[in-house]
Image (spheres, coloured by chain):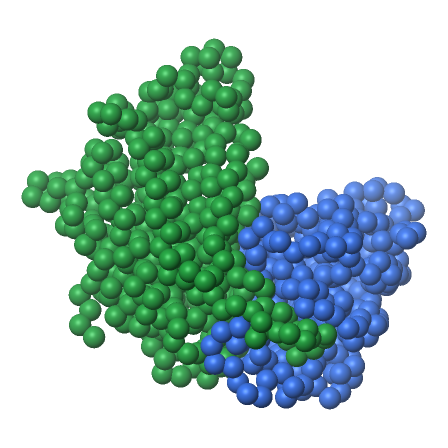
Chain colours: A green, B blue
Amino acid sequence: MATTSATSPEKPMRQQMEEYINKLQDTIVGAFEKLDPTSPKFKRDSWVRPQGGTGRSCVFASQPDTTSFTNNGGVSSANSSQNTQETILEKAGVNISIVHGILPPAALKQMRSDHTSIPLPETTEGLPFFAAGISLVVHPRNPHAPTVHANYRYFEITERSPTLMKTGEEKDEPSDNPEPSSPKILAWWFGGGADLTPSYLYQEDAVHFHKTLRNACALHSSALHSAFKKWCDEYFYIPHRGETRGVGGIFFDDLNDGQHVRLPGSDLDPQSTRPKTPQEIFAFVTSLGDAFVPSYLPVLEKRHSIPYTPHQRRWQLLRRGRYVEFNLVYDRGTKFGLMTPGARIESILMSLPETARWEYMSEMDEGEEEKKLLEVLKVPVDWVNFMG
Amino acid sequence: MATTSATSPEKPMRQQMEEYINKLQDTIVGAFEKLDPTSPKFKRDSWVRPQGGTGRSCVFASQPDTTSFTNNGGVSSANSSQNTQETILEKAGVNISIVHGILPPAALKQMRSDHTSIPLPETTEGLPFFAAGISLVVHPRNPHAPTVHANYRYFEITERSPTLMKTGEEKDEPSDNPEPSSPKILAWWFGGGADLTPSYLYQEDAVHFHKTLRNACALHSSALHSAFKKWCDEYFYIPHRGETRGVGGIFFDDLNDGQHVRLPGSDLDPQSTRPKTPQEIFAFVTSLGDAFVPSYLPVLEKRHSIPYTPHQRRWQLLRRGRYVEFNLVYDRGTKFGLMTPGARIESILMSLPETARWEYMSEMDEGEEEKKLLEVLKVPVDWVNFMG
């Protein structure tokens, strides 16, 4: 059971995770800034959640290009694209948040299906939670360079502190008293993943991305990668389009020391161990987090300066329309966020591309290159074992 | 009760509605084509629903402007915007559909809350339905010209035909046997509305649009407009933005001869009659349908050639992002459509703009004009009685 062991010998896991995602955010933003040194820096923006918690957004936005707003009509500005600096990225966000508060009984009830160690909410009172996570989305400008998304998070549900239990009236934990003497952890888990969304398919990029993630997984268990790769293909599926959002990666949730529905064999077969303790799973998550830069940056470096045509840009914007459709219609995190009163909408919708396009019965001539992408979105590929 | 009266002396209501929306589609498309005679015509496209039904899409799409795809990077085509013809509309669709089939018990159960004349689904069998409707969305190119949406529909649920009742196995009514000798109508209702979404607020446009709709309503009852105007403001609300999609119009659903939750007074007060029979409500709906062109075309005519700046185009594209957010996250018709197996996705997503834009913490200087719009989106205005 997931009750007592969520601390390392030295530091509580929440603190370890917080320190890790802080460092990872700097590493990732630093890597992008180094790749494109003449471009403006990411904008750093720290915020405080009134209900409890803090965060730091690092966001990149390209200067609006006035030529794209005249759009064959209206008043065109005299000095247009020649004056605007070209940047590798079009829109990107690398955000961390460390939040805490009280989960209402309805939310706890829903979580119990995956976390039976959460006690049944007896009354109308909720339970304290803590969540620390990093979330990033990068949309490059060049249609040959893929969009990437990654997200790693740690979640805890704890006992109500004696003060809270006595009065039982607070709706949220007071923000000046965030961690009253290490409350007992009732449930904990990690979740996350990373996935790649190209507009044009370069098979070697998909192979490189998947292999880098596979190698990170393999440091911890041979059972993890194939299960979480499959989960990713299933999660990022757009039913109304009959295609996946991109070429996948890995996706996992609810990972702790209990039985896991996606890893049934590994719990029975002593040969195939997998990370179980908080410290072991944290090590797995940090391997994946550390793998982000090597999984993606070499791809971006190869693709960002390939010449592209207006036709290719148009295709990219149509594909970004599909990205918007997935995120607004299906993504659980986005939907949950939009329904949360007081949520930071700008952070939740940071994942949306700068520009997206919808054409009715698109009359684009889908050439060989466009069709190549659509094929792998309809039938996911086992990229790690891909032979070309 | 809504059982026997849904036919006129001459023709079944389904036929009257079908004929009306066919004519209205031609009238509306004709009005747009007359306004912009040098622009390409709407594309007519008839389709057949394999499960039963037909439809006709009339769609306008502007020629993709290659300058907007170079976006300060990549290979720019030599002959760009100068060669592209400017059109008043950017993207528009005026669609009709006449469909029938079998509604599954789960759908019937949900509809019973508003239509108690639907019998409780006894077994796993469903009941036949018929739906005829017109749906339109027009996104003009010029940021000073508002987007408009309208939609009118008639819905029937009927008894199962003797053949269907005997075998009880068909999942859908055979398309070669659509209306076996006028089956008994168990429930019927009309729904619809029209609403305006400007990027820049011209108060006189909102007043004109609302007054035209009010006058159409007032031909039939004094009780209708204020109730359905209010419903519209509530329906097109985007909770996560704390604003409405646009400046409203009217919205109604489930209108038949029964008690209506939005029109409580009118059923008790004999002074305030309202349309109740199918023929009376059909007359109300045709008045509204007929009011579309006079409500919107004069506005478009006044605004489509006002010079605009890149700043104003950018603001328009950001507002279109909000339009996408409403339609994909909240619109009941869109959500229902996306979840319907075999639905025509292109028709459902026709409402989305050609281009939409999202900026993180948009740094646009919201000037007086932008703020004027945001104010009326946060607190809906009684436009019919607006005094400036």
User: What residue is drawn where x is 32% and y is 50%?
Assistant: A193
Residue A37 horizontal side relative to residue B332, left or right: left
User: What residue is drawn where x is 42% and y is 12%?
Assistant: A162
Can you say whether A130 is above or below A244 in the image?
above
Can you say whether A83 is above or below A61 in the image?
below
Quadrant (top left, top right, bottom left, bottom right) of the C terminus of chain A:
bottom left
Closer to the camera in the image, A258 or B100: A258
Q: How many marks?
A: 0
Of all residues, the one furthest to the left in this rendering is A271
Q: Image quadrant of residue A120?
A: top left
Can you say whether A19 is above or below B299 in the image?
above
Closer to the camera in the image, B311 or B51: B311
Residue A322 horizontal side relative to residue A244, left or right: right
Residue B249 in percent (x, y) is at 77, 57
User: What residue is drawn where x is 76% and y is 48%?
Assistant: B375
Residue A313 in percent (x, y) is at 48, 75
Residue B121 horizontal side relative to residue A73, left or right: left
User: What residue is drawn where x is 82% and y is 56%?
Assistant: B275
Does residue B200 show up?
yes
Closer to the camera in the image, B254 or B340: B340
Quadrant (top left, top right, bottom left, bottom right) of the N terminus of chain A:
top left
Q: Image quadrant of residue B194?
A: bottom right
Residue B342 in percent (x, y) is at 46, 68
Residue B79 in percent (x, y) is at 58, 88
Does residue B12 show up?
no
Residue A148 horizontal side relative to residue B103, left or right: left
Closer to the camera in the image, A242 or B152: A242
